[in-house]
């Protein structure tokens, strides 16, 4: 069934209850590559990033008991970030239910609040139907994670071969995209044309829908500035004259925030208007006119009174908006967005350059971002943990191409994501250079997965920003709790030695003048590499964070 659904990779970890499944993968000719990981959580993160860069479903698997519980963080991240991930966890035999066997847990109850759909099979002949259901659930509407529990004894039972078929439409997402109702696109255009200072704010939903070209056409035609959430980066190439950059409490700056405050109409596209993008609903202020595009009707009007709600696939919705603008009766209006964006970005990058050109030690994070912009290829895929590196990257690194080239787990922000997710991204796009950014706190969560990276031979470059603390929390204690630091510091580790022990070519950078040369050497190496960058502590920096508790 997985082969029929077009699955090419499975990320997972072996266990007693999965033995029949592994034996089947070994014996059968299916064309699926199984990637053995060192932790089920990382299998889910790999599947998540794989789904983000390929447009296909990511698949992960693990055994019963602890395996089922460890896989949960990746599923909730995928569901909340709207990416399709299928988790298959094996289970104890149905015949053992209620007899207190080892690793017994109610998997269906465990997964229910964290997935879009889930089931535990009781019969083998249900497998084809349930796999088809899982793929429909994952790829239609707002995408999300699903789960199938596979009991040990069920894995031995027969299935009718005639039932092994799949719907090819659900191999990719969004599947069966829906158009908005008649007349809503015209209402949205009317609202935009009646404004004086509109601002488009895009979230991850726009990139998921592959609506970038339609957005570009709309924004360019009317000269409307386009801001994004962190997840919405790539809605436009960030070198585009109308690309304002990230707004909000993480990765937003005072300069970009000016447009959020000044807008008389905010046009949300594929973004839920949650706490981060709005800096805990500081802007737009209540009463600001709002037009909201989203595939999920539940987000329309959830946080702001909405003048026009456009419910439907973002690409199809914007096609309708552009069609309305093409009508002879519609008169174009130009809003002067490019000129306003140019002024804001000039002032923002003046501040950035002061720090990016600094020779201070420890190295300022801006210096690292500047070096990355100068050395990474245009089609690089950058994966970041949500800690120290994320706000700096989102604020200052200008993605030269539209599309999903930046990945971070913004829905729940668990540390340890980037190292594993970067391998999933590489399996999805092996011809693109993949770079993973993380703090030393995050590195400690998942450094064992470096063995998986070496076994795969993936030429990923890992960059560890080392400052010997959980920086985001320490900066929050500095900002909001009078610098009363408590249990946020840890002893320094030799990340170079750790990486070398796994076989990676590694460097430690303490002098900012060495940054670009080391990066270039790492990028040109034909295997996995790691760079430890001794960086300024977040609480001492000029971090682009508006609200530490945002």
Image: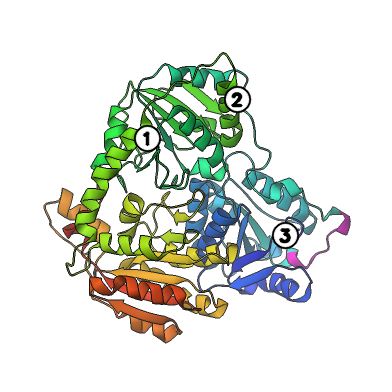
Rounded to the nearest angstrom, the CA distance separating label 3 from label 1 is 47 Å
- Mark in front: 1 vs 2: 1
Report crowding for label 3: few under 14, some 14 to 19, many 20 or more residues within 10 A (C-alpha): many
- What is the magenta range? 155-162
- Frontmost of labels 3 and 2 is 2
* Discs 3/1, front: 1
Let me know if residue 468 is in the magenta part. no
Q: Is residue 504 above or below residue 220?
A: below
Foreground of the two, 402 or 459:
402
Q: Position of residue 105 (x, y in %)?
A: 56, 60
Which of the marked residues, 3 or 1, is nearer the chain's N terminus? 3
Q: Within 10 angstroms of label 1, few (less than 14), some, or many (20 or more) residues?
A: many
Q: Say whether residue 247 is left or right of residue 358.
A: right
Residue on which disc 1 sits: 338
Reading the image, the residue beneath label 2 is 323
Secondary structure beneath label 3: loop
Q: Which quadrant of the view contains residue 222?
A: top left
The structure residue drawn at horizontal position 61% and vertical position 33%, both measured from the top left corner, is: 316
Going 43% across and 49% down the picture, which residue do you hit? Answer: 411
Task: Tell me the residue at 64%/41% (across/down).
Answer: 140
Q: Is residue 513 left or right of residue 122?
A: left
Which picture quadrant has residue 469? bottom left
Label 3–label 2 contact, CB within 8 A: no
Residue 2: numbered disc: 3
Residue 333 percent across, percent down from the top left: 44, 21
On the image, the x and y values in percent for residue 274 come to 38, 38
Quarter the C terminus occupies: top left
Please state which of residues 339 and 53 is positioned toward the viewer in this rendering. Answer: 339
- 315 over 466 or under it: above or below: above
């Amino acid at each position: 069934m997985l082969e029929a659904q077009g699955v090419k990779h499975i990320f997972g970890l072996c266990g007693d209850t999965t033995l029949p499944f592994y034996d089947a993968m070994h014996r059968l000719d299916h064309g699926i590559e199984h990637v053995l990981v060192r932790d089920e959580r990382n299998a889910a993160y790999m599947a998540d990033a794989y789904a983000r860069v390929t447009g296909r479903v990511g698949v992960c698997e693990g055994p019963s008991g602890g395996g089922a519980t460890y896989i949960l963080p990746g599923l909730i991240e995928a569901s909340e970030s709207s990416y399709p991930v299928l988790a298959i966890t094996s289970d104890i035999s149905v015949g053992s239910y209620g007899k207190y066997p080892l690793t017994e847990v109610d998997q269906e109850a465990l997964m229910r609040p964290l997935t879009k759909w889930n089931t535990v099979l009781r019969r083998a002949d249900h497998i084809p139907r349930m796999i088809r259901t899982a793929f429909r659930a994952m790829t239609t509407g707002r995408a999300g994670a699903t789960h199938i529990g596979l009991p040990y004894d069920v894995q031995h039972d027969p299935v009718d071969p005639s039932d092994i078929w799949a719907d090819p439409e659900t191999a990719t997402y969004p599947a069966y995209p829906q158009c908005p109702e008649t007349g809503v696109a015209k209402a949205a255009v009317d609202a935009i044309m009646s404004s004086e200072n509109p601002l488009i704010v895009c979230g991850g939903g726009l990139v998921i829908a592959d609506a970038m070209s339609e957005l570009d056409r709309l924004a360019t035609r009317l000269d409307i500035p386009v801001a994004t959430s962190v997840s919405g980066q790539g809605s436009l190439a960030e070198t585009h004259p109308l690309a304002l950059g990230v707004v909000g409490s993480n990765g937003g700056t005072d300069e970009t925030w000016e447009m959020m405050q000044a807008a008389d109409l905010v046009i949300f596209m594929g973004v839920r208007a949650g706490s981060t993008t709005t800096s805990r609903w500081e802007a737009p202020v209540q009463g600001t006119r709002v037009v909201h595009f989203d595939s999920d009707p539940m987000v329309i009007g959830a946080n702001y009174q909405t003048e026009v709600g456009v419910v439907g696939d973002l690409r199809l919705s914007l096609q309708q908006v552009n069609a309305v603008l093409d009508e002879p009766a519609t008169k174009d209006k130009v809003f002067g967005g490019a000129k306003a964006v140019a002024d804001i970005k000039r002032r923002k990058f003046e501040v950035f350059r002061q720090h990016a050109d600094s020779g201070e030690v420890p190295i300022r994070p801006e210096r690292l971002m500047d070096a990355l912009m100068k050395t990474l290829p245009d089609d690089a895929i950058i994966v970041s943990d949500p800690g120290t590196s994320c706000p700096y990257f989102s604020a200052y690194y200008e993605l030269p191409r539209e599309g999903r080239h930046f990945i971070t787990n913004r829905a729940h922000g668990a540390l340890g994501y980037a190292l594993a997710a970067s391998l999933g991204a590489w399996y999805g796009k092996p011809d693109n250079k993949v770079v993973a950014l993380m703090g030393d706190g995050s590195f400690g969560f998942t450094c064992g997965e470096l063995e998986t990276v070496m076994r795969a031979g993936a030429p990923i470059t890992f960059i560890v920003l080392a400052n010997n603390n959980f920086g985001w929390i320490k900066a929050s204690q500095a900002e909001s709790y009078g610098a009363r630091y408590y249990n946020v510091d840890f002893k320094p580790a030799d990340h170079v030695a750790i990486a070398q022990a796994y076989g990676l070519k590694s460097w430690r950078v303490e002098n900012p003048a060495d940054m670009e040369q080391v990066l270039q050497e790492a990028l040109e190496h034909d295997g996995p590499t790691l760079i430890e960058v001794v960086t300024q502590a977040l609480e001492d920096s000029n971090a682009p964070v508006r609200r530490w508790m945002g």
